[in-house]
Protein backbone atom coordinates (compact mmCIF):
# COMPACT_ATOMS: atom_id res chain seq x y z
CA UNK A 1 0.00 0.00 0.00
CA UNK A 2 2.96 2.31 0.52
CA UNK A 3 3.48 4.87 -2.22
CA UNK A 4 6.27 7.36 -2.90
CA UNK A 5 5.58 11.07 -2.32
CA UNK A 6 7.49 13.22 -4.82
CA UNK A 7 10.46 10.89 -4.76
CA UNK A 8 10.64 10.82 -0.96
CA UNK A 9 11.17 7.64 1.04
CA UNK A 10 7.78 5.94 1.49
CA UNK A 11 6.32 6.46 4.95
CA UNK A 12 4.42 4.08 7.14
CA UNK A 13 2.06 4.65 10.02
CA UNK A 14 -0.68 3.28 12.24
CA UNK A 15 -4.31 4.26 11.84
CA UNK A 16 -5.23 5.02 15.44
CA UNK A 17 -8.77 5.49 16.78
CA UNK A 18 -9.44 7.07 20.18
CA UNK A 19 -13.06 6.67 21.30
CA UNK A 20 -13.64 8.92 24.32
CA UNK A 21 -16.72 9.67 26.37
CA UNK A 22 -17.67 12.86 24.57
CA UNK A 23 -16.13 12.30 21.15
CA UNK A 24 -14.14 10.10 18.80
CA UNK A 25 -10.92 11.04 17.05
CA UNK A 26 -8.76 9.24 14.55
CA UNK A 27 -5.52 9.97 12.77
CA UNK A 28 -2.33 8.50 11.44
CA UNK A 29 0.54 8.01 13.86
CA UNK A 30 3.58 8.18 11.60
CA UNK A 31 6.79 6.19 11.88
CA UNK A 32 8.27 9.24 13.62
CA UNK A 33 5.80 8.69 16.46
CA UNK A 34 3.89 11.91 15.79
CA UNK A 35 0.15 12.16 15.12
CA UNK A 36 -0.83 13.50 11.72
CA UNK A 37 -4.03 15.47 10.96
CA UNK A 38 -6.35 14.08 13.62
CA UNK A 39 -10.11 14.26 12.93
CA UNK A 40 -12.72 14.57 15.65
CA UNK A 41 -16.46 14.08 15.94
CA UNK A 42 -18.44 14.74 19.13
CA UNK A 43 -20.76 12.11 20.63
CA UNK A 44 -23.86 12.84 22.70
CA UNK A 45 -24.17 11.73 26.31
CA UNK A 46 -27.67 11.48 27.79
CA UNK A 47 -28.81 11.63 31.41
CA UNK A 48 -32.28 10.04 31.68
CA UNK A 49 -32.26 10.75 35.43
CA UNK A 50 -29.89 11.89 38.16
CA UNK A 51 -28.09 8.54 38.35
CA UNK A 52 -28.20 7.23 34.79
CA UNK A 53 -25.71 8.07 32.03
CA UNK A 54 -26.20 6.56 28.56
CA UNK A 55 -24.99 6.73 24.97
CA UNK A 56 -26.17 5.43 21.62
CA UNK A 57 -23.90 2.55 20.48
CA UNK A 58 -24.72 3.24 16.83
CA UNK A 59 -23.69 6.88 17.19
CA UNK A 60 -20.37 5.70 18.65
CA UNK A 61 -19.96 3.37 15.69
CA UNK A 62 -20.90 5.93 13.03
CA UNK A 63 -18.52 8.49 14.56
CA UNK A 64 -15.73 5.90 14.55
CA UNK A 65 -16.27 5.03 10.89
CA UNK A 66 -16.45 8.69 9.86
CA UNK A 67 -13.19 9.82 11.45
CA UNK A 68 -11.35 6.60 10.55
CA UNK A 69 -12.32 6.87 6.89
CA UNK A 70 -11.03 10.44 6.82
CA UNK A 71 -7.68 9.19 8.09
CA UNK A 72 -7.59 6.41 5.48
CA UNK A 73 -8.32 8.97 2.78
CA UNK A 74 -5.46 11.18 3.93
CA UNK A 75 -3.10 8.19 3.97
CA UNK A 76 -4.00 7.38 0.39
CA UNK A 77 -3.63 10.99 -0.73
CA UNK A 78 -0.19 11.27 0.87
CA UNK A 79 1.06 7.81 -0.03
CA UNK A 80 1.40 6.74 3.60
CA UNK A 81 1.25 2.99 4.11
CA UNK A 82 -1.06 1.84 6.92
CA UNK A 83 0.73 -0.97 8.74
CA UNK A 84 -1.96 -1.58 11.36
CA UNK A 85 -5.02 -0.22 13.13
CA UNK A 86 -4.97 0.59 16.86
CA UNK A 87 -7.82 1.36 19.22
CA UNK A 88 -8.13 3.17 22.55
CA UNK A 89 -11.47 3.48 24.32
CA UNK A 90 -13.30 4.85 27.33
CA UNK A 91 -13.01 1.54 29.21
CA UNK A 92 -16.04 0.54 31.34
CA UNK A 93 -18.91 1.74 29.12
CA UNK A 94 -20.89 -1.43 28.27
CA UNK A 95 -23.26 -2.63 25.54
CA UNK A 96 -25.55 -5.51 24.58
CA UNK A 97 -26.26 -6.34 20.93
CA UNK A 98 -27.64 -8.96 18.57
CA UNK A 99 -24.88 -10.94 16.83
CA UNK A 100 -27.10 -11.63 13.79
CA UNK A 101 -28.48 -8.16 13.07
CA UNK A 102 -25.66 -6.18 14.74
CA UNK A 103 -28.34 -4.05 16.36
CA UNK A 104 -27.86 -2.75 19.94
CA UNK A 105 -30.55 -3.98 22.32
CA UNK A 106 -30.23 -1.13 24.83
CA UNK A 107 -28.51 2.22 25.22
CA UNK A 108 -24.88 1.87 26.30
CA UNK A 109 -24.28 2.06 30.04
CA UNK A 110 -21.63 4.80 30.41
CA UNK A 111 -18.86 4.38 32.99
CA UNK A 112 -20.18 7.41 34.92
CA UNK A 113 -23.55 5.70 35.54
CA UNK A 114 -24.49 5.25 39.23
CA UNK A 115 -27.94 3.65 39.04
CA UNK A 116 -26.84 0.57 41.00
CA UNK A 117 -24.64 2.36 43.54
CA UNK A 118 -26.94 1.71 46.52
CA UNK A 119 -27.43 -1.92 45.61
CA UNK A 120 -23.72 -2.51 45.12
CA UNK A 121 -22.96 -0.89 48.48
CA UNK A 122 -24.66 -3.86 50.16
CA UNK A 123 -21.89 -6.12 48.81
CA UNK A 124 -19.08 -4.03 50.29
CA UNK A 125 -18.78 -5.66 53.76
CA UNK A 126 -18.38 -9.13 52.28
CA UNK A 127 -16.57 -8.37 49.02
CA UNK A 128 -14.46 -5.19 49.23
CA UNK A 129 -11.41 -6.80 50.85
CA UNK A 130 -11.68 -9.84 48.56
CA UNK A 131 -11.84 -7.76 45.37
CA UNK A 132 -9.08 -5.38 46.45
CA UNK A 133 -6.76 -8.35 46.93
CA UNK A 134 -7.44 -10.03 43.61
CA UNK A 135 -8.73 -7.24 41.32
CA UNK A 136 -7.01 -4.18 42.80
CA UNK A 137 -10.31 -2.32 43.23
CA UNK A 138 -13.31 -2.50 45.58
CA UNK A 139 -16.95 -3.22 44.67
CA UNK A 140 -17.39 0.39 43.54
CA UNK A 141 -20.54 2.15 42.43
CA UNK A 142 -20.96 0.79 38.89
CA UNK A 143 -21.17 -2.70 37.39
CA UNK A 144 -21.67 -3.51 33.70
CA UNK A 145 -22.29 -7.11 34.74
CA UNK A 146 -25.15 -6.28 37.09
CA UNK A 147 -26.64 -4.00 34.43
CA UNK A 148 -26.48 -6.71 31.77
CA UNK A 149 -27.98 -9.30 34.12
CA UNK A 150 -30.91 -6.95 34.78
CA UNK A 151 -31.42 -6.29 31.07
CA UNK A 152 -31.65 -10.04 30.44
CA UNK A 153 -34.05 -10.48 33.35
CA UNK A 154 -36.30 -7.51 32.60
CA UNK A 155 -36.24 -6.89 28.83
CA UNK A 156 -38.05 -9.57 26.76
CA UNK A 157 -36.09 -8.85 23.56
CA UNK A 158 -32.73 -9.14 25.35
CA UNK A 159 -33.90 -12.29 27.13
CA UNK A 160 -34.94 -13.84 23.81
CA UNK A 161 -31.61 -12.92 22.22
CA UNK A 162 -29.82 -14.67 25.08
CA UNK A 163 -32.07 -17.73 24.91
CA UNK A 164 -31.41 -18.15 21.18
CA UNK A 165 -27.64 -17.58 21.40
CA UNK A 166 -27.75 -14.26 19.56
CA UNK A 167 -26.79 -11.98 22.47
CA UNK A 168 -23.34 -10.40 22.72
CA UNK A 169 -21.94 -8.32 25.58
CA UNK A 170 -18.88 -6.12 25.82
CA UNK A 171 -17.34 -2.78 26.58
CA UNK A 172 -16.74 -0.16 23.87
CA UNK A 173 -13.54 -1.85 22.68
CA UNK A 174 -15.36 -5.17 22.25
CA UNK A 175 -18.17 -3.49 20.29
CA UNK A 176 -15.74 -1.68 17.98
CA UNK A 177 -13.47 -4.70 17.47
CA UNK A 178 -16.49 -6.82 16.55
CA UNK A 179 -17.72 -4.16 14.11
CA UNK A 180 -14.33 -3.36 12.58
CA UNK A 181 -13.67 -7.05 11.86
CA UNK A 182 -17.09 -7.63 10.35
CA UNK A 183 -18.24 -9.65 13.35
CA UNK A 184 -15.26 -12.01 13.29
CA UNK A 185 -13.79 -11.24 16.74
CA UNK A 186 -15.54 -10.89 20.12
CA UNK A 187 -12.76 -9.99 22.53
CA UNK A 188 -11.44 -7.48 25.04
CA UNK A 189 -8.12 -6.67 26.72
CA UNK A 190 -6.88 -6.36 30.32
CA UNK A 191 -6.73 -2.55 30.27
CA UNK A 192 -10.42 -2.48 29.39
CA UNK A 193 -11.61 -5.52 31.32
CA UNK A 194 -10.10 -4.29 34.61
CA UNK A 195 -12.35 -1.22 34.61
CA UNK A 196 -15.47 -3.42 34.60
CA UNK A 197 -14.61 -4.74 38.05
CA UNK A 198 -14.27 -8.33 36.86
CA UNK A 199 -10.58 -8.93 36.01
CA UNK A 200 -8.13 -10.99 38.08
CA UNK A 201 -4.92 -8.95 38.04
CA UNK A 202 -2.35 -11.70 38.41
CA UNK A 203 -4.11 -14.47 36.49
CA UNK A 204 -5.15 -12.64 33.30
CA UNK A 205 -8.62 -14.12 33.71
CA UNK A 206 -12.18 -13.13 34.49
CA UNK A 207 -13.23 -13.15 38.15
CA UNK A 208 -15.97 -15.66 37.49
CA UNK A 209 -16.99 -16.06 41.13
CA UNK A 210 -17.78 -12.34 41.49
CA UNK A 211 -19.31 -11.96 38.03
CA UNK A 212 -21.58 -14.95 38.58
CA UNK A 213 -22.55 -13.58 42.01
CA UNK A 214 -23.96 -10.54 40.21
CA UNK A 215 -26.20 -12.80 38.12
CA UNK A 216 -24.27 -12.39 34.86
CA UNK A 217 -24.14 -15.50 32.62
CA UNK A 218 -20.49 -16.47 32.16
CA UNK A 219 -21.00 -17.70 28.61
CA UNK A 220 -21.48 -14.05 27.52
CA UNK A 221 -17.98 -12.97 28.58
CA UNK A 222 -15.75 -11.80 25.71
CA UNK A 223 -12.46 -13.58 25.07
CA UNK A 224 -9.54 -12.04 26.97
CA UNK A 225 -6.49 -11.19 24.84
CA UNK A 226 -3.32 -9.22 25.56
CA UNK A 227 -3.42 -5.55 24.55
CA UNK A 228 -1.13 -6.25 21.57
CA UNK A 229 -2.33 -9.76 20.76
CA UNK A 230 -4.01 -8.81 17.49
CA UNK A 231 -7.72 -8.90 16.75
CA UNK A 232 -7.96 -10.11 13.20
CA UNK A 233 -8.14 -7.95 10.11
CA UNK A 234 -10.35 -4.95 9.41
CA UNK A 235 -13.28 -5.56 7.11
CA UNK A 236 -12.52 -3.68 3.84
CA UNK A 237 -16.22 -2.93 3.46
CA UNK A 238 -16.02 -0.82 6.64
CA UNK A 239 -12.87 1.29 6.28
CA UNK A 240 -11.82 0.52 2.74
CA UNK A 241 -8.66 -1.28 3.86
CA UNK A 242 -7.90 -4.77 5.13
CA UNK A 243 -5.09 -4.40 7.66
CA UNK A 244 -4.33 -5.99 11.04
CA UNK A 245 -6.25 -4.61 14.02
CA UNK A 246 -3.14 -4.91 16.12
CA UNK A 247 -3.72 -3.32 19.55
CA UNK A 248 -6.51 -2.21 21.86
CA UNK A 249 -6.08 -0.34 25.16
CA UNK A 250 -8.06 1.64 27.68
CA UNK A 251 -7.52 5.34 27.06
CA UNK A 252 -5.70 6.24 30.29
CA UNK A 253 -3.39 3.24 29.90
CA UNK A 254 -2.56 4.29 26.34
CA UNK A 255 -1.88 7.84 27.52
CA UNK A 256 0.49 6.51 30.20
CA UNK A 257 2.49 4.73 27.49
CA UNK A 258 2.68 7.82 25.28
CA UNK A 259 3.73 10.02 28.21
CA UNK A 260 6.59 7.68 29.07
CA UNK A 261 5.16 5.65 31.95
CA UNK A 262 6.93 2.47 30.90
CA UNK A 263 8.87 1.46 34.01
CA UNK A 264 8.22 1.53 37.75
CA UNK A 265 8.00 5.05 39.15
CA UNK A 266 7.36 6.79 35.83
CA UNK A 267 4.03 8.56 35.88
CA UNK A 268 1.65 11.03 34.33
CA UNK A 269 -0.96 13.55 35.38
CA UNK A 270 -3.59 14.51 32.83
CA UNK A 271 -5.63 17.60 33.68
CA UNK A 272 -9.00 17.83 31.99
CA UNK A 273 -12.49 18.15 33.45
CA UNK A 274 -11.00 16.18 36.32
CA UNK A 275 -7.46 14.93 36.73
CA UNK A 276 -5.95 11.45 36.47
CA UNK A 277 -2.64 10.47 38.06
CA UNK A 278 -1.18 7.15 36.88
CA UNK A 279 2.16 5.50 37.58
CA UNK A 280 3.79 2.34 36.28
CA UNK A 281 4.67 -0.13 39.06
CA UNK A 282 6.50 -2.93 37.23
CA UNK A 283 5.68 -6.60 36.71
CA UNK A 284 4.28 -7.09 40.22
CA UNK A 285 1.08 -5.22 41.16
CA UNK A 286 1.20 -2.71 44.00
CA UNK A 287 -2.12 -3.46 45.66
CA UNK A 288 -4.27 -0.72 47.22
CA UNK A 289 -3.81 0.12 50.89
CA UNK A 290 -6.83 0.24 53.20
CA UNK A 291 -5.69 3.58 54.65
CA UNK A 292 -5.51 5.31 51.23
CA UNK A 293 -8.83 5.70 49.47
CA UNK A 294 -9.37 5.94 45.74
CA UNK A 295 -6.05 4.51 44.51
CA UNK A 296 -6.68 1.53 42.23
CA UNK A 297 -4.29 -1.14 40.96
CA UNK A 298 -4.68 -2.21 37.35
CA UNK A 299 -2.84 -3.68 34.37
CA UNK A 300 -0.89 -0.81 32.85
CA UNK A 301 -0.41 -2.84 29.65
CA UNK A 302 -0.05 -6.47 28.68
CA UNK A 303 2.46 -7.15 25.90
CA UNK A 304 2.61 -10.77 24.86
CA UNK A 305 2.43 -12.81 28.04
CA UNK A 306 3.88 -10.10 30.31
CA UNK A 307 1.74 -7.67 32.29
CA UNK A 308 3.19 -4.41 33.53
CA UNK A 309 1.00 -2.97 36.25
CA UNK A 310 0.04 0.56 37.21
CA UNK A 311 -1.77 2.57 39.85
CA UNK A 312 -4.42 5.19 39.17
CA UNK A 313 -6.15 7.89 41.19
CA UNK A 314 -8.70 10.42 40.01
CA UNK A 315 -10.14 13.73 41.14
CA UNK A 316 -13.34 14.83 39.43
CA UNK A 317 -12.78 18.58 39.72
CA UNK A 318 -10.00 20.36 37.84
CA UNK A 319 -11.01 22.10 34.64
CA UNK A 320 -14.64 21.89 35.77
CA UNK A 321 -13.82 24.24 38.67
CA UNK A 322 -12.34 26.80 36.28
CA UNK A 323 -15.33 26.52 33.97
CA UNK A 324 -17.71 26.85 36.93
CA UNK A 325 -16.19 30.18 37.94
CA UNK A 326 -16.29 31.39 34.35
CA UNK A 327 -19.93 30.34 33.96
CA UNK A 328 -20.71 32.39 37.07
CA UNK A 329 -19.28 35.44 35.30
CA UNK A 330 -16.32 35.97 37.64
CA UNK A 331 -13.78 35.40 34.85
CA UNK A 332 -14.08 35.62 31.09
CA UNK A 333 -12.07 32.45 30.49
CA UNK A 334 -9.84 29.92 32.27
CA UNK A 335 -6.88 31.73 30.71
CA UNK A 336 -7.90 35.01 32.36
CA UNK A 337 -8.34 33.19 35.67
CA UNK A 338 -4.81 31.83 35.38
CA UNK A 339 -3.39 35.24 34.55
CA UNK A 340 -5.11 36.75 37.58
CA UNK A 341 -3.84 33.94 39.83
CA UNK A 342 -0.30 34.54 38.58
CA UNK A 343 -0.38 38.04 40.06
CA UNK A 344 -0.67 36.72 43.62
CA UNK A 345 2.67 35.72 45.18
CA UNK A 346 3.17 32.59 47.23
CA UNK A 347 2.98 33.38 50.90
CA UNK A 348 2.10 31.48 54.07
CA UNK A 349 -1.37 31.97 55.52
CA UNK A 350 -2.81 33.39 52.33
CA UNK A 351 -6.58 33.76 52.17
CA UNK A 352 -9.02 32.76 50.82
CA UNK A 353 -8.87 28.95 50.60
CA UNK A 354 -10.82 26.69 48.23
CA UNK A 355 -11.68 22.98 48.55
CA UNK A 356 -12.66 22.02 44.97
CA UNK A 357 -14.96 19.12 45.87
CA UNK A 358 -17.68 20.19 43.45
CA UNK A 359 -18.28 16.52 42.60
CA UNK A 360 -17.07 14.83 45.77
CA UNK A 361 -13.70 13.60 47.10
CA UNK A 362 -12.09 10.23 46.39
CA UNK A 363 -8.53 10.62 47.70
CA UNK A 364 -7.21 10.74 50.42
CA UNK A 365 -10.65 9.80 51.82
CA UNK A 366 -13.68 8.40 50.02
CA UNK A 367 -16.43 11.01 50.28
CA UNK A 368 -18.19 11.11 46.88
CA UNK A 369 -21.07 13.05 48.40
CA UNK A 370 -18.85 15.89 49.67
CA UNK A 371 -19.34 19.44 48.47
CA UNK A 372 -16.91 22.29 47.80
CA UNK A 373 -15.96 25.08 50.20
CA UNK A 374 -14.62 28.62 49.84
CA UNK A 375 -13.37 30.10 53.11
CA UNK A 376 -11.36 33.01 54.43
CA UNK A 377 -13.08 35.79 52.46
CA UNK A 378 -12.60 39.36 53.69
CA UNK A 379 -13.36 42.83 52.37
CA UNK A 380 -9.80 42.88 51.08
CA UNK A 381 -10.24 39.74 48.93
CA UNK A 382 -9.67 40.44 45.24
CA UNK A 383 -10.50 38.55 42.05
CA UNK A 384 -6.83 37.64 41.83
CA UNK A 385 -6.93 36.20 45.36
CA UNK A 386 -9.97 34.15 44.43
CA UNK A 387 -8.30 32.87 41.26
CA UNK A 388 -5.17 31.92 43.18
CA UNK A 389 -7.26 30.08 45.80
CA UNK A 390 -8.89 27.99 43.08
CA UNK A 391 -5.57 27.02 41.48
CA UNK A 392 -4.13 26.26 44.92
CA UNK A 393 -7.12 24.01 45.68
CA UNK A 394 -6.80 22.13 42.40
CA UNK A 395 -3.05 21.70 42.89
CA UNK A 396 -3.47 20.43 46.46
CA UNK A 397 -6.15 17.95 45.33
CA UNK A 398 -3.86 16.63 42.59
CA UNK A 399 -1.01 16.52 45.11
CA UNK A 400 -3.23 14.26 47.26
CA UNK A 401 -3.46 11.91 44.27
CA UNK A 402 0.30 12.00 43.69
CA UNK A 403 0.99 11.35 47.37
CA UNK A 404 -1.60 8.56 47.46
CA UNK A 405 -0.13 6.80 44.42
CA UNK A 406 3.46 7.21 45.67
CA UNK A 407 2.57 5.91 49.15
CA UNK A 408 0.72 2.94 47.67
CA UNK A 409 3.66 2.28 45.34
CA UNK A 410 6.01 2.48 48.31
CA UNK A 411 8.41 4.69 46.36
CA UNK A 412 8.53 8.21 44.96
CA UNK A 413 7.87 9.07 41.32
CA UNK A 414 11.03 8.92 39.24
CA UNK A 415 9.46 11.08 36.55
CA UNK A 416 6.15 12.89 36.22
CA UNK A 417 4.92 14.18 32.89
CA UNK A 418 1.77 16.26 32.68
CA UNK A 419 -0.72 17.02 29.95
CA UNK A 420 -4.35 17.79 29.19
CA UNK A 421 -6.00 21.09 28.40
CA UNK A 422 -5.72 22.57 31.89
CA UNK A 423 -1.97 21.88 31.97
CA UNK A 424 -1.61 24.83 29.62
CA UNK A 425 -1.82 27.07 32.71
CA UNK A 426 1.73 28.07 33.68
CA UNK A 427 0.62 29.41 37.09
CA UNK A 428 -1.07 26.10 37.92
CA UNK A 429 2.01 24.05 37.01
CA UNK A 430 4.31 26.34 39.00
CA UNK A 431 2.07 25.87 42.05
CA UNK A 432 1.88 22.12 41.39
CA UNK A 433 5.65 21.74 41.13
CA UNK A 434 6.11 23.67 44.38
CA UNK A 435 3.60 21.51 46.26
CA UNK A 436 4.88 18.17 44.95
CA UNK A 437 8.57 19.07 45.17
CA UNK A 438 8.99 17.35 41.79
CA UNK A 439 9.99 18.73 38.40
CA UNK A 440 6.98 18.50 36.07
CA UNK A 441 7.47 18.08 32.34
CA UNK A 442 4.60 19.43 30.27
CA UNK A 443 4.59 17.28 27.15
CA UNK A 444 4.39 18.90 23.76
CA UNK A 445 1.37 16.95 22.46
CA UNK A 446 -0.75 15.57 25.27
CA UNK A 447 -4.04 15.94 23.38
CA UNK A 448 -3.15 12.90 21.25
CA UNK A 449 -1.58 10.81 24.03
CA UNK A 450 -4.23 8.07 24.03
CA UNK A 451 -4.18 7.99 20.25
CA UNK A 452 -0.39 7.67 20.14
CA UNK A 453 0.09 5.24 23.03
CA UNK A 454 -1.99 2.45 21.57
CA UNK A 455 -0.47 3.13 18.13
CA UNK A 456 3.00 2.69 19.64
CA UNK A 457 1.95 -0.72 20.98
CA UNK A 458 0.60 -1.72 17.56
CA UNK A 459 3.67 -0.34 15.79
CA UNK A 460 6.08 -2.32 17.95
CA UNK A 461 4.07 -5.48 17.23
CA UNK A 462 4.33 -4.80 13.48
CA UNK A 463 7.92 -3.68 13.20
CA UNK A 464 7.65 0.12 12.97
CA UNK A 465 9.78 0.39 16.12
CA UNK A 466 11.95 -2.06 17.97
CA UNK A 467 10.47 -1.19 21.36
CA UNK A 468 8.18 1.23 23.16
CA UNK A 469 11.25 2.92 24.68
CA UNK A 470 12.59 3.69 21.20
CA UNK A 471 9.53 5.58 20.00
CA UNK A 472 8.62 7.21 23.33
CA UNK A 473 12.10 8.58 23.96
CA UNK A 474 12.31 9.87 20.38
CA UNK A 475 9.47 12.32 21.01
CA UNK A 476 10.37 15.99 21.67
CA UNK A 477 10.88 16.98 25.28
CA UNK A 478 8.45 19.39 26.86
CA UNK A 479 8.83 22.40 29.13
CA UNK A 480 9.93 21.55 32.67
CA UNK A 481 8.57 23.35 35.73
CA UNK A 482 11.02 23.09 38.62
CA UNK A 483 9.91 23.42 42.26
CA UNK A 484 11.11 26.63 43.90
CA UNK A 485 9.47 26.41 47.35
CA UNK A 486 11.75 25.48 50.27
CA UNK A 487 11.00 22.04 51.70
CA UNK A 488 9.88 23.40 55.07
CA UNK A 489 7.43 25.82 53.48
CA UNK A 490 6.13 23.08 51.22
CA UNK A 491 5.52 20.83 54.22
CA UNK A 492 3.77 23.68 56.03
CA UNK A 493 1.43 24.36 53.12
CA UNK A 494 0.57 20.69 52.74
CA UNK A 495 -0.11 20.39 56.47
CA UNK A 496 -2.36 23.46 56.36
CA UNK A 497 -4.27 21.92 53.43
CA UNK A 498 -4.82 18.67 55.34
CA UNK A 499 -6.15 20.63 58.31
CA UNK A 500 -8.50 22.57 56.02
CA UNK A 501 -9.73 19.40 54.32
CA UNK A 502 -10.25 17.60 57.63
CA UNK A 503 -12.21 20.54 59.06
CA UNK A 504 -14.37 20.71 55.93
CA UNK A 505 -15.16 17.00 56.01
CA UNK A 506 -15.97 17.18 59.72
CA UNK A 507 -18.60 19.86 59.11
CA UNK A 508 -19.99 18.47 55.83
CA UNK A 509 -23.17 16.45 56.21
CA UNK A 510 -22.76 12.79 55.26
CA UNK A 511 -24.35 11.55 52.09
CA UNK A 512 -27.48 9.42 51.94
Image (tube, helix red, strand yellow):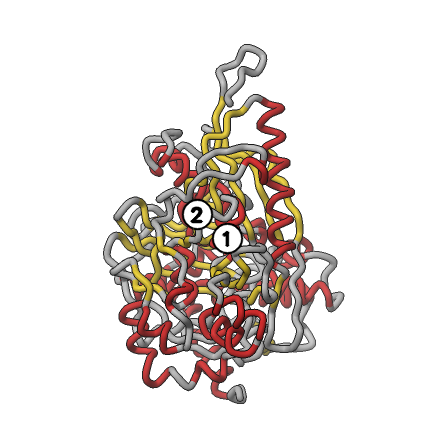
Q: Which residue is mark 2?
A: 248
**Which of 147/375 is in front?**
147
Using a 10 Å C-alpha cutoff, classify the residue at mark 2 as few (fewer than 14 neighbours), some (14 to 19) or many (20 or more).
many
Q: Is residue 201 left or right of residue 121?
A: left
Crowding at dot 1, Cα within 10 Å, few <14 / some 14-19 / many 20+, comes out as: many
| For the residues bearing labels 1 and 2, Cβ distance under 8 angstroms | yes
**Depth check, front residue: 8 or 363:** 8
Task: Indicate left or right for 164 with 209 as reference.
Answer: right
Q: How many marks?
A: 2
Residue 79 screen position, x and y as percent: 56, 21
Residue placed most toward the observer, 242 or 449 = 242
Residue at (62%, 42%) from the top-left corner? 67
Q: Considering only vertical position in the picture, is 221 above or below 429?
A: below
Task: Tell me what residue is drawn at x 33 percent, y 46 percent.
Answer: 262
Q: Is residue 440 visible?
A: no
Position of 67 with respect to 179 (left or right) is right
Marks 1/2: CA distance?
A: 8 Å
Q: x%, y% of residue 463?
A: 36, 29
Where is residue 37 shown, x and y percent of the image?
Answer: 61, 34
The vertical placement of 509 against 78, above or below, is below
Viewer-proximal residue among 31 and 441: 31
Q: Which mark is residue 374?
A: none
Name the residue tied to disc 1: 89
The image quadrant of residue 101 is bottom right
Amino acid sequence: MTQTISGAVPRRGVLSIDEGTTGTRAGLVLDSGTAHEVSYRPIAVSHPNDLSVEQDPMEIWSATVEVARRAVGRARALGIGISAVALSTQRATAMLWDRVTGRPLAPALVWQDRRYARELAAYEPEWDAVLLARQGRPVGSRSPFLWAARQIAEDPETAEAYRTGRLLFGTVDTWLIWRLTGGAVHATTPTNAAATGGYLLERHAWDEEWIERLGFPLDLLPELRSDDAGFGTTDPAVLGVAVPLAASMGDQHAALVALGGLFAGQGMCVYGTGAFVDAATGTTPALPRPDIAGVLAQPGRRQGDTTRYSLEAYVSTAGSALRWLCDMGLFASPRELGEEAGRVPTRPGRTPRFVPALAGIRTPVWRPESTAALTGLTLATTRADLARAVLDGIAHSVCDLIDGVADTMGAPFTRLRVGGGVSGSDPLLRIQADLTGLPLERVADSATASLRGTAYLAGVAHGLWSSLEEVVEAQPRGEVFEPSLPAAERAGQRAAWRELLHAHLETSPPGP
